Image (spheres, rainbow, N blue to C red):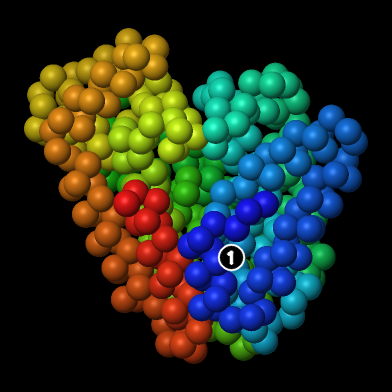
Amino acid sequence: MAIAPTVEAVMQAGGAHIPPLLAAAEERLAALAAGHGHVLARHAGDTIAAGGKRLRPLLVLVVAGQSARAVEAVRAAVAVELIHSATLVHDDVLDAAALRRGRPTVVATAGRAIATATGDLLFSRAFAELAANGRPEEVRVLSDASSALAEGELLQRADAFDPRVALERYLRRCELKTASLFEAACRLGALEAPGGAGDSEALGAFGRRVGLAFQLLDDVLDVSGPASRTGKTRGADLLDGTVTLPLILARERDPELAGVDLRGVVTPERAAEVCDRIEATGVLAEARRRALEVVADAKAALPELDERRRAALELVADSVVERYA
């Protein structure tokens, strides 16, 4: 998998130990995907290979630091990425999504049964991988994050097609569905850092804020970004009946958006029309400003760390903003 420029910068800031550890995590991910029969291995492998910036495993490795046990830190990084990959597969099943990062999804190519089994496999391998570290506290951290992911999904389903969803409820959903895994990545890294478990709470809070900003901007991109940039249909959230920050803010400026019938948004063309109307209110700049404030809060709340780890973590926080630039 090609390494994104931002990830390269983080690796350079974090120290010479980061690139080989991230490469080891990639090798382990590929090996795990290949070890469970041809059908599941192909789809699990495709999901993992689709990748992304690997921000979550990178957070584990940066927080753990250069004195951490390499094998155990890599296992933790791999486990977090496997959970992330599993949730993407399951989300695509629930949404009947055709594209993910510009590629056909597992559910689109192989159907619901295979896709569900692929997601289940990735979940199970994550916990098996992490359990090998022999640290029950790490398993608890990942289990709590997985429970939060499920709770967030249930909350999103309960709110589907309701344009009146409150801002506070939306933010809670973002914390559960996205920020919880960023938080877990930082907590796992802290547990792997020699004597660093005492920073777990503060570093977890940093990860939670970074994850929240990541989701806020992802929701902005769903409205503003073409498929060639985002890897998915513009307005995919609207097509799924999911109310996000841009619509929540826009309905205050455009009364007709407050009463929009999301069940009537059934084609990409109609979704694009609603996106255009949301964008015309000027709220995307407001949404981006809110995300920038969350990123600033994340960096300001970092505990005392060595210069390398702090610089690398600040770069990770800044990278979520660069996705929108």
**Which residue is located at x 46 percent, y 73 percent?**
313
Quarter occupied by residue 75: bottom right
* Side of 258 where 183 appears, left or right: right
Query: Is any atom of residue 266 visible in this view?
Result: yes
The 10 Å Cα crowd at callout 1, few under 14, some 14 to 19, many 20 or more, is: many
Amino acid type, mark 1 = Leu
Q: Is residue 43 above or below residue 131?
A: above
Asked if residue 120 can be seen in this view, the reply is no
Which of 305/234 is in front? 234
Q: Secondary structure at mark 1?
A: helix
Q: Residue at x 53, y 45 (%)?
A: 149
Residue 105's x, y, as percent? 62, 28
Q: How many marks?
A: 1
Which residue is disc 1 drawn over? 58
Look at 45% across and 80% down and name the residue there: 310
Q: Relative to residue 116, is residue 319 depicted above or below?
A: below
Percent x, y for residue 171? 33, 47
Q: Is residue 253 left or right of residue 66?
A: left
Q: Is residue 10 above or below residue 150?
A: below
Residue 163, position in %: x, y?
26, 26
- Residue 43 figure quarter: top right
**Residue occupying the point 76% across, 46% down:** 124
Within the image, what quadrant is residue 99 found in?
Answer: top right
Residue 315 locus on image (x, y percent): 43, 69
